[in-house]
Image: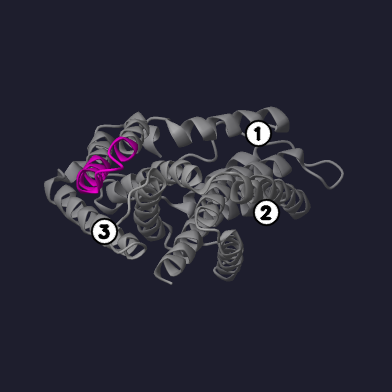
Amino acid sequence: MTSTLLLALAVFGACAVESVEALTLVLAAGSTRGWRSAFEGAAAALAVLTVLVAVVGVPLIHYVPLDALRVVIGALLLVLGLSWLRKATLRASGRKALHDEDAIYRRTVADLAATPPPIGGRSAVGFAVAFKGVLLEGTEVVLIVVSLGASDHRLGLASAMAAAAAVVVTAVGVMVARQLREVPENTLKFGVGIMLTSFGVFWVGEGAGLRWPGRDAAILVLILGYLLLSVILVRWLRATAPGEDRASPTSGPVGDGSPVSSSTVRRVIEAFGRFWWEFFIGDTPEIFLGTLLVLGAALAWRHQRLVAIPLVLLLTLVTFAGSTFHGLHKRPADDA
C-alpha cells in the first residue's frame, strides 16, 4: 500500500512538472501562430507518446526478467531523480535562478511573432513548436510512467496518474489565464526529485538481489533521508552564499535554445537527440558515472547486505553532493 501511494504521487508530481513546461510552448504557439496548428502539433506528439508506452511498456512487463528490469529502471530513475534534485536544491538555496514559465512564455511568443504569418490557416512553425514541446517533455513522462509502472507491474496506475496530472495542469493553466507560475513547479521538482532518487536506489538494490529492511517501507525511509539531506544542504548553501551570487528568476532557454525555424523534421530530430544526450550525460557526467558506481556496488556486494546497502547509500549521497557543488561553479546558461 505504501509503495503504491508513493508511486502514484511520484508519477503525478513528475508529470505535472513536465506538463507545465509542455503547456507553456503549446499556449505560446497557439496564441501567436493559430490554435489549430498548435493543437494538431500537440495531438500528434501525444499519439507518438501513446504508441511508445504501448510498444515499450507492455513488452517490458511481459518479456523482460523482473530483476533485470528493476536494475535498468532503477538506474534510469536514479539518473533522472538526481538531476532534478540537484537543480531543485540549487534553486531552493538561491544559487540557481528559478524556472519562470511566464518569462519563457513571453520569450517564445516574441520569437514566434517574428516569423512569417501562417498560410491557409495552418502554421508549420506553430505545429513544430507544439509538437516538439509536447514530444520532448512527454518523453520524460513516458520514461517515468514506464519505469515506475513496469518495475512494480502497475503500468495502468502510472498511466492514469500521468493523464490526471496533464488534465489538472491544463485546467489550472487555463483558469489562471496562462500565468503558469501559479503552478509550484520548482517545489514539485524538489519533491519529485527526492522520490525518483529513492525509487531508483530501491529498485537498483532489489534488482541486484538486495533485500531492504522493511521491504517496501524502506522507500519511505529513503525519501525521508534524502529530504533531510537536501534540506541541510539547502540551508548550508544559503548561509554560505555571497550576496551578489544569489540568483533571481530568469526566463531560461526556450526549448533547445535555438531560434524558431520552419524546418520541422530536422529540428525535432536534433532536439530529440540532444534530449537523450542531456538525459544520460549532458553537462553532469558525474551523475552518470555515480549511477554506474552505485549499480556496480549493488551487483558486486549483493550477497553481503550489511556492506552493500551502506555502500550504495554512501555512493548516492556522494554523487548528489558532488554534482550539487559542481553546479555552483557553472554559468547559468550551462545548467538551465
Residue 227, label in figure: 3
Which quadrant holds the N terminus? bottom left
Marks 2 and 3 sit apart, C-alpha to C-alpha, by 40 Å
Give the left or right position of residue 30, taking residue 309 as reference: right
Q: Residue furthest front?
A: 303
Q: Name the residue that disc number 1 marks.
A: 268
Say what amino acid the circle numbered 3 marks: Leu
The amino acid pointed to by label 1 is: Val
Region in magenta: 297-316
Q: Are dots 2 and 3 in contact, CB under 8 Å?
A: no
Label 3 secondary element: helix
Q: Is residue 318 magenta?
A: no
Secondary structure at badge 2 equals helix
| Viewer-proximal residue among 103 and 155 | 155
Q: Say if 202 sits above or below 311 in the image.
A: below
Disc 2 and disc 1: Cα gap in Å? 21 Å
Q: Position of residue 244 (x, y in %)?
A: 19, 42
Q: Is residue 23 left or right of residue 48?
A: left
Q: Viewer-proximal residue, 69 or 178?
A: 69
